[in-house]
């Protein structure tokens, strides 16, 4: 038997196999978008086939999987610059300086894909906003970057992230009425967790504007929300404190103080965010009643014990700078104001 008679068929099979392999490789190369969820774990790989404000659909081996926007930590698109991917990773871990360094290396002119360019523009604005909120960048320029992005991409799943950052920028810039609008975008979302977040942040903004009735209505929505995730439960606790502050502003100081002191007695003092808000609330009520010594004591607890809570600490330092002169200690007032300016250069408390 001639051993070479089977050679043509063997070659044919090899060619067919090579063609299938090549086709498969092309398919894999095209289907390498990745979705990372807030739950952690391995990324879901496939091809993004739909992307809206509220969900993203990815096709995985012929089957569509849908993810809501609030459960997506980040998306990595097939073919995006590696520096953009690394910048997203750094943003996810709060390493803004490293994200900025990576972003500077990106040649935006080399980005040909519209969807990757959309992502690039979003993160450019997001990083600029995060940097400005640390007092290291131009807040107005960052705001314009995000506003322009939202104008062109209001149906993107990154919309809610942009709205929250715009709200934070508005608070820092003293345009609190605009912050109410931006946080309202979160409150109007279909997701309970975002509703809680948006209502709490919006309520805080309204309280700053002294619109206590509207603020309390927001806090009540938070308190009544049926949620179980840790972040939302945290907002529910904070909303209960803020709601009491509203009642104090409306003239129910004695009842408010009693409620707050009960929360202190029954609460866990290791919950820094909650206790910083509690002591600031007590300090504010005592200050309003002219009880300067008691007010100073409350704000000092935030200053000395819970300085890690930046927003509450800024409020405490501002309040102390106003209270120390009332008991004849001008030097401590100067020190408190100086620390406020040094630690929180973009804080709205510094502009009061």
Image (cartoon, helix red, strand yellow):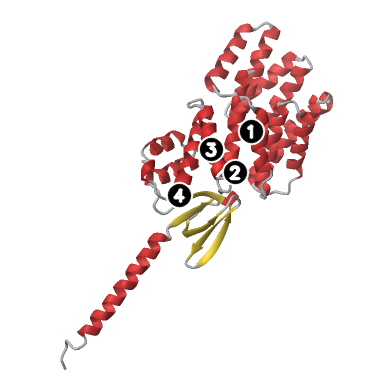
What is the quadrant of the N terminus in the image? bottom left
Sort mark 1 into few (<14), some (14-19) or many (20+) by Cα contacts within 10 Å: many
Mark pair 1, 3: CA separation: 34 Å
Q: Residue furthest front?
A: 152
Residue named by callout 3: 148
The number of numbered discs placed on residues in the rendered structure image is: 4
Q: Of tags 1 and 4, which is closer to the observer?
A: 4
Along the polypeptide, which appears first: circle 1 or circle 4?
4
Q: Secondary structure at mark 3?
A: helix
Residue contact at pointers 1 and 3, CB within 8 angstroms: no
Q: Secondary structure at mark 4?
A: helix
Q: Which residue is mark 2?
A: 160
Residue under numbered circle 1 = 273
User: Which image quadrant for residue 254?
Assistant: top right
Report which residue position mark 4 lands on.
114
Q: Is residue 11 visible?
A: yes
Q: Nearer the viewer, residue 311 or 3?
A: 3
Choose between 103 and 196: the one closer to the eye: 103
Front position among marks 2 and 4 = 4
| Mark 2 surroundings: few (<14), some (14-19) or many (≥20) residues within 10 A | many
Is residue 260 shown left or right of residue 4? Answer: right
Q: Residue furthest bottom?
A: 1
Q: Position of residue 313 (x, y in %)?
A: 61, 25
Find the distance from the CA under tag 2 to the CA under tag 4: 20 Å
- Looking at the image, is 302 positioned above or below residue 82? above
Q: Earlier in the sequence, mark 3 or mark 4?
A: 4
């Amino acid at each position: 038997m001639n051993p070479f008679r089977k050679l043509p068929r063997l070659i044919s099979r090899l060619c067919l196999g090579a063609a299938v392999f090549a086709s498969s490789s092309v398919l894999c190369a095209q289907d390498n978008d990745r979705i990372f969820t807030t739950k952690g774990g391995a990324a879901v790989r496939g091809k993004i086939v739909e992307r809206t404000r509220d969900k993203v659909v990815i096709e995985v081996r012929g089957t569509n999987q849908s993810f809501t926007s609030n459960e997506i930590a980040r998306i990595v698109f097939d073919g995006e610059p590696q520096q953009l991917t690394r910048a997203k990773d750094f943003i996810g871990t709060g390493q803004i300086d490293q994200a900025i360094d990576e972003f500077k290396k990106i040649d935006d002119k080399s980005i040909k894909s519209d969807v990757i360019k959309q992502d690039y523009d979003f993160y450019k604005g997001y990083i600029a906003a995060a940097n400005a909120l640390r007092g290291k960048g131009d807040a107005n320029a960052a705001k314009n970057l995000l506003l322009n992005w939202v104008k062109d991409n209001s149906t993107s799943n990154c919309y809610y992230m942009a709205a929250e950052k715009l709200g934070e920028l508005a608070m820092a810039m003293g345009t609190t009425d605009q912050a109410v609008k931006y946080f309202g975008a979160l409150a109007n979302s279909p997701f309970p967790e975002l509703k809680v977040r948006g209502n709490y942040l919006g309520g805080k903004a309204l309280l700053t504007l002294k619109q206590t009735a509207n603020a309390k209505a927001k806090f009540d929505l938070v308190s009544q929300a049926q949620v179980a995730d840790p972040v939302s439960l945290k907002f529910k606790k904070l909303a209960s404190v803020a709601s009491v502050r509203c009642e104090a502003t409306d003239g129910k100081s004695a009842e408010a103080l009693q409620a707050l002191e009960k929360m202190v007695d029954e609460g866990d003092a290791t919950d820094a965010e909650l206790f910083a808000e509690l002591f600031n609330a007590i300090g504010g009520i005592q200050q309003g009643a002219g009880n300067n010594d008691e007010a100073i004591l409350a704000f000092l607890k935030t200053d000395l014990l819970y300085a890690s809570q930046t927003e509450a600490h800024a409020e405490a330092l501002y309040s102390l700078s106003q209270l120390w002169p009332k008991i004849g200690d001008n030097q401590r007032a100067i020190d408190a104001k100086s620390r406020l300016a040094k630690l929180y250069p973009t804080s709205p408390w510094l502009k009061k």
